[in-house]
Image (cartoon, rainbow, N blue to C red):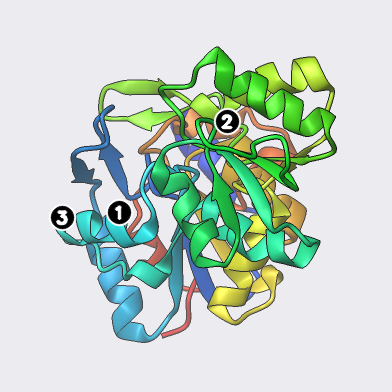
Amino acid sequence: MKRESDRNRHSLSKEGRLRPINGFVFDLDGTLVLTDRSFSGYQALPGAVEVLNELQARGIPFVVLTNGTHYPSSEQAPKLRAVGLPISDDALLTPSSVAADLMPRRGVKRVLVLGTPGVGQPLAQAGIQAIFPNEEGTDEVDAVYIGWHPDCRMKDIEAAVKAIWNGAELYVASDVPFFATAGGKSMGYSYAISAAVRRITRAPMILTGKPSLHALRLVAKRLGTPMSKVGVVGDDPLVEMIMARRGGAVGFGVTTGISKARDWARQPLGRRPHRVLRGLAELVTTPGIVDC
């Protein structure tokens, strides 16, 4: 008799034949690595280095999309390469990468940034003026952008509120309450800060991180393929899998982060992966996922 986990995995993978996949986007924390709470060290998860190297060898493009904004890609990617992950600076995307792509197209030129300097760096590189709460002109901006801000003060929240009252749009890097680390769940700061700002202002939120379709569109553009031919690999049904389902991509759920096989089995269709992976290596060893 099959074990319950085997039956669940089988039922999750039988929605029909998987569509062709031209490229992959990987989540970072809980999928490729576990990090400590201070973001000073990374531990590559089993199979992560081998799978990325194999995709690279086959010429199958991939990017990594993290909801973290603490470091810009130019600082974080070298740390990942140091633990063996072949991730170029250009292949590491953050919500700030998405914001830097989206804001100019929406006419945003000046932004109040609630976050560390790394949160605003991609915006500045895109020609957007990034202003921080302790600087002049915080109430004369086109948008407020909330990212990783562990040292947030009430004055920062007040500056964001006043800017929104003056007509600024609200952009948020991540609306995820927690993420997986080596020490367990870690709180998402932008989630808490944006909740406070929105409670006061009732402002609508433009989300730039996962599961936003703004993020998936940038991924597809970087991979050079339609969203329907992107394979989305991650550990969170409320993040990667919602994004995959909404965008018509193909979702792959891993069990190395916040979700185990039993957790995936409980998910409704809109948050369910098309296939649950027993190990990350199944991406390159299972016939029908990628063509050799």
User: Alpha carbon of mark 3 to alpha carbon of mark 1: how far?
Assistant: 12 Å
Q: Is residue 183 left or right of residue 257?
A: left
Q: Which quadrant is the N terminus positioned in?
A: top left
The three-letter code of the residue at mark 2 reads Val
Query: Is any part of residue 21 visible from this angle?
Result: no
Mark 2 vs 1: CB contact within 8 A? no
- Tell me the element at label 1: helix
Residue drawn at (45%, 66%) of the image = 63
Question: Disc 2 or disc 1, which is closer to the eye?
Answer: 1
Q: Which residue is mark 1?
A: 76
Residue 227, given in percent of the width and then of the height, sits at: 68, 69
- Tell me the element at label 3: loop
Residue 224, given in percent of the width and then of the height, sits at: 59, 82
Q: Does residue 66 lie above or below 7 as drawn?
A: below
Residue 145, given in percent of the width and then of the height, sits at: 62, 41
Q: Which residue is mark 3?
A: 83
Q: Earlier in the sequence, mark 3 or mark 2?
A: 3
Mark 3 vs 2: CB contact within 8 A? no
- Mark 2: give few (<14), some (14-19) or many (20+) Cα within 10 Å: some
Q: Is residue 100 left or right of residue 64?
A: right
Q: Earlier in the sequence, mark 2 or mark 1?
A: 1
Residue drawn at (83%, 28%) of the image = 165
* Residue 132 badge: none
The three-letter code of the residue at mark 3 reads Val
Q: Does residue 55 lie above or below 171 as drawn?
A: below
Q: Is residue 119 left or right of residue 102?
A: left
